[in-house]
Image (cartoon, helix red, strand yellow):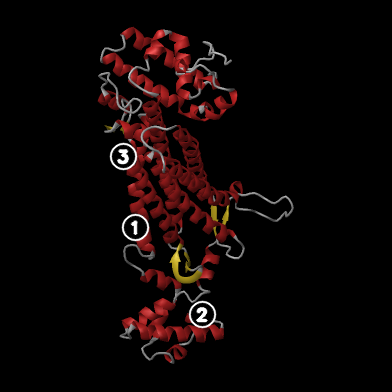
Amino acid sequence: MHKKITLSQAKTWSGRFSVPTTELVKTYTASVFFDKKLALFDIQGSLAHAQMLSEIGILSQQDLKAIQSGMTTIKKEIEREEFQWSLDSEDVHLNIERRLTDLIGDAGKRLHTGRSRNDQVATDIKLYLRYQLDTIQLHLIELISACVLLAQQHYDTIMPGFTHLQVAQPITLGHHLHAYCEMFERDLERLEDCRKRLNRLPLGSAALAGTSYPLNRYRVMELLGFDDITRNSLDSVSDRDFAIEFCSCSSLLMIHLSRLSEELILWMSPRFGFIEIGDAFCTGSSIMPQKKNPDVPELARGKSGRVIGHLMGLLTLMKSQPLAYNKDNQEDKEPLFDTVETVAQTLQVFRDMLGDIKVYTDSMRQAAREGYATATDLADYLVKKGVPFRDAHEIVAKAVLHAEKKEVDLDALSLTELKNFSTHIEKDVYQVLTLSGSVNSRDLPGGTAPKQVKKALNQTLTRIKKRLLISQKRLSST
């Protein structure tokens, strides 16, 4: 014979059941110990819902004031870490509702009128993610600013540009770093675009079919700062596109950070010797006293796989779900929360690390001399003298082969030697065979000429300052 559910065991939905949930099932199905991150956003959403219920006459002014007072108490308890979370109450929503009812009585029970946990949790997650997205955008803007600052200091520092990790052409470090600024700006644009689709209110969709109460969804939209309401109740409660899209944007951002990490790791290696990362961002070895390991970029490179994994997990989570809400969706929160925290921490630590990098300019310049980086400049020189490009390519290839045998760079070959490969070569050839001449000749928008790099970095900074004001305004109004 089964035990009947007692009042102390009863859940909000237990009237339908005659057998209590086992302790194992409680633990397996509960989400309170991770979704409590949504607590303050749940309170924010509940207060807006209560305000609207009062305005349409479903809640009395007395009940509204009691709810507002009770939620203020609960918010303080949560912020002081004094709130008692209960496994029996399953999730963040029921924990807060139970505590509210304990504090204010029947008014707390009336709060849930016209809504379901399905549209409630969708709203909470959107409120949480919107705030975190705005915060992450701010961190990303700060990172871009740090990257621009380092690039400005080295707008004319010559280094080798690589393809296939082989020396290709001379560029400047400022130009190289500006490439990452461009990547990060695209990440900013993607996050902003993600925010547009995120910022639609699902509350008012109830469990799946809407509600018979005359709710004013647009009023709640206004109170919570959403741009619009969702347009279909079934989609509203089951949609997690916004979480997937955020994790997709985050994955690409982490890939960009991982690419930068890989270069910093290589550049810090004695085989390159281009940079040194500050001690605060490195660790030593337990056995080799000489070691200085670039742990921060290595961890960022590793954590990119973690974030990409969360994206794959969310895609898989949603791929076979029928409409509308399913319990599977409880599994959306942990990967989303971890993605938010991983991205936010990585951006902050990279911002600080870029401000603590020492650049060995002589090593960079010397490396640019070692791979015949100005060979393309010699070919371009010949083309400008009237030689067809394919012929110029062949001429320069033979000149490089000759220089390799002599173990010298192209600019070390005498004019007589160079003329053996083409009579079009004159004394002015040495202007293009120098590293400075090479980078300065790339004088067009997007090129590596120092004055173009300087201009591009200033334009980046101007755009970023505008974005900074938007982010600060959003966060200050939250």
Q: Nearer the viewer, mark 3 or mark 1?
A: 3
Residue depicted at x 51% and y 20%: 89
Residue 346 locus on image (x, y percent) = 51, 44
CA–CA distance in space, label 2 to label 1? 31 Å
N-term-proximal mark, 3 vs 1? 3
Q: Which residue is mark 3?
A: 196
The kind of residue on which mark 2 rests is: Asp
- Sequence-wise, the earlier of marks 2 and 1 is 2
Horizontal and vertical percent position of residue 137: 40, 41
Q: Quadrant of the N terminus?
A: top right
Identified at 49% across, 29% down, the residue is 35
Amino acid marked by disc 3: Lys
Which residue position holds label 1?
A: 455
Instruction: Establish if 106 lies above or below 310.
Output: above
- The answer to whether one can see residue 351 in this image is no
Residue located 41% across and 77% down the image: 376
Q: Amino acid at mark 1?
A: Lys
Upstream in sequence: badge 3 or badge 2: 3
Asked whether 185 or 16 is in front, the reply is 16
The residue drawn where x is 60% and y is 53% is 294
**Label 3, label 1: how many angstroms apart (C-alpha)?**
31 Å
Which residue corresponds to mark 2?
A: 409
Q: Which mark is residue 305?
A: none
Q: Is 40 left or right of 55, judged from the image as shown?
A: right
Image quadrant containing the C terminus: top left
Q: Is residue 77 above or below residue 451?
A: above
Mark 3 in CB contact with mark 2 (< 8 angstroms)? no
Label 2 with label 1: CB-CB less than 8 Å: no
Residue closest to the eye, 300 or 471? 300
Regarding mark 2 in the picture, which secondary structure is present there? loop
